[in-house]
């Protein structure tokens, strides 16, 4: 029986190898020879299919962006079970794609801007709908809350090894995700503080700040 990798076309193998190298090493440090070696093809074939490293990067951007935006569309209460199952079925691929987009965010690429804008817009829409139907609590700043939820999600999926080891695992993976799932939802569902003392203190400090937002 053929493996999934052997079923891929040469172009797909090159693209996947490039995604892995770009995510790990960055665009500038990655060279076509390394990508070709990982893909099991010649450097000439990479040029034949993609023309240049820049064009290959563009193809990788579009591929990862399409997948992650599709997942963002599923990141609603009705689709969370399917999204969770998808992650557990292939956590390494999922994590690699998120790492790739984080690298793109660091380099401030157009694909990264589209990805972040889409995630924040989707999150804000979910939050506003939840507030409107009474399933979520109101927020003083829904847009900022949307950015915070995106930040938390991305940070979780790219958890560094020291934090995973704090939970008794060598690196982030399905076991860590399972361990975090209920505490995360408990925090979102029930909150953390039993009274509003900290919130009142923060509001007072912000009101007294000379840089208070209009």
Image (spheres, rainbow, N blue to C red):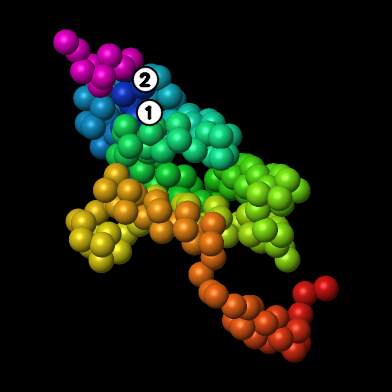
Q: Residue at x 57, y 60 (%)?
A: 148
Q: Which numbered tag is attached to residue 24?
A: none
Residue 70 position by quadrant? top right
Image quadrant in which the N terminus is located: top left
- Left or right: residue 128 compared with residue 189: right
Element at label 1: helix
Residue 139 position by quadrant? bottom right
- Tell me if I can see residue 2 in this picture: yes
Asked whether disc 1 touches disc 2, contact meaning CB atoms under 8 Å apart, the reply is: yes
- Residue 201 image point, x, y percent: 65, 85
Q: Residue at x 56, y 40 (%)?
A: 77
- Residue 199 image point, x, y percent: 64, 78
- Residue 110 image point, x, y percent: 59, 43
Q: Residue at x 36, y 43 (%)?
A: 95
Element at label 2: helix
Q: Is residue 7 magenta?
A: yes
Question: Which residue is under mark 2?
Answer: 11
- Left or right: residue 11 compared with residue 40: right
Q: Nearer the viewer, residue 168 or 147?
A: 168
- Tell me if I can see residue 64 in this picture: no
Q: Is residue 91 magenta?
A: no
Q: Residue at x 36, y 22 (%)?
A: 12
- Left or right: residue 122 compared with residue 52: right
98 vs 11: above or below: below
Q: Please, which residue is most extreme toward the top here?
A: 1
Provide the major secondary structure of the magenta segment.
loop
Magenta highlight range: 1-9
């Amino acid at each position: 029986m053929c493996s999934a990798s052997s079923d891929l076309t040469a172009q797909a193998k090159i693209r996947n190898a490039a995604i892995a190298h770009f995510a790990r090493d960055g665009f500038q440090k990655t060279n076509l020879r390394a990508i070709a070696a990982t893909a099991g093809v010649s450097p000439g074939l990479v040029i034949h299919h993609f023309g240049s490293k820049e064009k290959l990067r563009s193809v990788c951007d579009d591929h990862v962006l399409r997948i992650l935006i599709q997942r963002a569309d599923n990141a609603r209460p009705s689709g969370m079970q399917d999204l969770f199952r998808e992650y557990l079925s292939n956590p390494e691929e999922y994590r690699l794609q998120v790492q790739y987009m984080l690298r793109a965010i660091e380099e401030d690429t157009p694909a990264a801007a589209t990805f972040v804008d889409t995630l924040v817009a989707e999150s804000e829409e979910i939050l506003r709908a939840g507030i409107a139907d009474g399933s979520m609590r109101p927020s003083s700043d829904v847009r900022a809350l949307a950015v915070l939820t995106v930040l938390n999600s991305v940070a979780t999926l790219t958890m560094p090894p020291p934090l995973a080891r704090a939970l008794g695992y060598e690196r982030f993976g399905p076991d860590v995700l399972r361990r975090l799932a209920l505490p995360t939802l408990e925090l979102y569902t029930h909150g953390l503080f039993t009274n509003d003392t900290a919130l009142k203190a923060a509001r007072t400090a912000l009101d007294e700040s000379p840089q208070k937002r209009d």
